[in-house]
């Protein structure tokens, strides 16, 4: 007869039933809230030092990917530790599922998960043994956990490598194992601290495919990152700098906030002063920027409404149009502009 230890270290290859997302029953002890996370005027200060987080306020809706974006030292990790209840705010209020973060009980904590930036699993254990251990930590019984372990490992494409020792895994495979361990107990909310740090662009894109699939199944994801381009994968983005909130909204809302509107690139045979003046008088045109002798960039309130009027105004003045294309600035450009516009950054 095999001992329990021997059974735990062994993975079965027998077919397992498909797993349906768990049905979450709401009781009077767990009131329904529109927001899963909420920060209200939160400030965190250590001793007499300058506050690390200053007057933060935002909400995270259920089934949303929420990205906290900022450079190193901007307060991302501190914000996450406040939300998970590790730190108590110096001022303000932080809640998870409507409960004050640092007062969460064990039952509530079982509904969430945390994926740290550093690899904290056991290198001397196999992939299967590591995730099996984490499932036991979350209180999953041995017989109930097996199909969930397989589902999590298959999601991150590690089922075939389940017998490999963690010490034999590449950096990218370790990140995938950490993600599987965070998902094995089917949480409603997962915190990820820079989950794609240090991995190659191909694997990074695959991770985000996983995150979007998880979101589509109803999981709420709170993620921090320094990779500015990853903001476009998210439903909502909060940009921090020196502990302060610089921008909050969807990626497109932040683009329009920074640029002042939508952008159109217009190519003509020649851009002259009279033509620039004609364009400035078109309703909805907010700004004009001459890019070259043949090209001009227009900022408009609404491109759908402004484009026909721009075309009409140029045709009436017999100006030949070579091309008109909408211009969507990358989030890198937006981030740089936002930092340059930050008055505190300008003084430093």
Image (cartoon, rainbow, N blue to C red):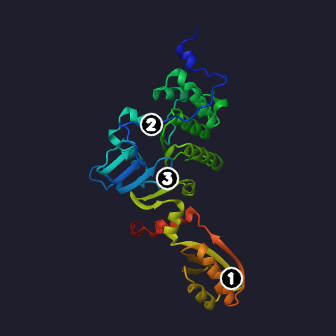
Q: Residue at the location (49% across, 37% down)?
A: 187
Q: CA distance from mark 1 to mark 3?
A: 39 Å
Residue sitting farthest toward the left: 48
Residue 102 is drawn in which quadrant? top left
Where is residue 249 shown, x and y percent of the image?
48, 60
Which residue in the protein does label 2 denote?
Answer: 111
Which residue in the protein does label 3 denote?
Answer: 67
Question: Which of label 3 and label 2 is nearer to you?
Answer: 2
Question: On screen, 84 above or below 129?
Answer: below
> Which labelled disc corresponds to residue 294?
1
Where is residue 345 shown, x and y percent of the image?
42, 66
Dot 1: what SS? Answer: loop
Q: Residue at the location (51% across, 26% down)?
A: 133
Q: Earlier in the sequence, mark 1 or mark 3?
A: 3
Q: Earlier in the sequence, mark 1 or mark 2?
A: 2
Where is residue 132 shown, x and y percent of the image?
54, 26
Dot 3: few (<14), some (14–19), or many (≥20) neighbours within 10 Å? many
Dot 2: few (<14), some (14–19), or many (≥20) neighbours within 10 Å? some
Question: Which of label 1 and label 3 is nearer to you?
Answer: 3
> Which labelled disc corresponds to residue 246?
none
Residue sitting farthest toward the top: 1
Q: CA distance from mark 3 to mark 2?
A: 20 Å
Asked whether residue 192 appears in the rendered view, the answer is: yes
322 relative position to 77: left or right? right
Q: CA distance from mark 1 to mark 2?
A: 58 Å
Image quarter where the C terminus lies is: bottom left
Q: Residue at the location (54% across, 74% down)?
A: 301
């Amino acid at each position: 007869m095999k001992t329990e230890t021997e059974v735990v270290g062994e993975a079965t290859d027998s077919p397992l039933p498909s797993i349906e997302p768990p049905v979450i029953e709401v009781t009077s002890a767990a009131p329904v809230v529109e927001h899963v996370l909420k920060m209200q005027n939160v400030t965190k200060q250590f001793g007499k030092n300058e506050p690390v987080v200053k007057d933060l306020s935002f909400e995270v809706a259920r089934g949303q990917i929420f990205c906290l974006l900022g450079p190193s030292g901007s307060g991302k990790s501190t914000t996450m530790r406040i939300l998970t209840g590790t730190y108590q705010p110096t001022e303000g209020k932080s809640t998870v599922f409507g409960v004050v973060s640092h007062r969460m009980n064990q039952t509530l904590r079982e509904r969430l998960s945390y994926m740290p930036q550093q690899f904290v699993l056991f290198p001397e254990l196999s992939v299967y043994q590591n995730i099996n251990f984490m499932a036991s930590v979350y209180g999953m019984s041995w017989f109930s956990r097996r199909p969930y372990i397989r589902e999590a490992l298959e999601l991150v494409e590690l089922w075939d490598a389940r017998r490999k020792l963690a010490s034999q895994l590449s950096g990218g495979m370790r990140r995938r194992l950490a993600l599987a361990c965070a998902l094995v107990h089917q949480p409603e909310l997962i915190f990820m601290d820079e989950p794609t740090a240090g991995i190659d662009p191909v694997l990074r894109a695959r991770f985000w495919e996983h995150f979007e699939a998880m979101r589509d199944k109803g999981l709420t994801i709170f993620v921090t990152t320094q990779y500015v381009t990853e903001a476009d994968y998210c439903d909502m983005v909060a940009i921090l700098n020196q502990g302060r909130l610089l921008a909050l909204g969807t990626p497109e809302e932040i683009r329009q906030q920074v640029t002042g509107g939508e952008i159109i690139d217009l190519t003509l045979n020649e851009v002259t002063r009279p033509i620039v003046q004609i364009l400035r008088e078109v309703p909805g045109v907010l700004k004009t920027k001459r890019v070259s002798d043949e090209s001009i960039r227009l900022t408009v309130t609404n491109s759908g409404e402004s484009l026909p009027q721009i075309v009409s105004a140029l045709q009436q003045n017999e100006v030949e149009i070579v091309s008109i294309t909408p211009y969507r600035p990358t989030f890198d450009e937006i981030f740089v502009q936002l930092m340059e516009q930050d008055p505190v950054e300008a003084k430093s």
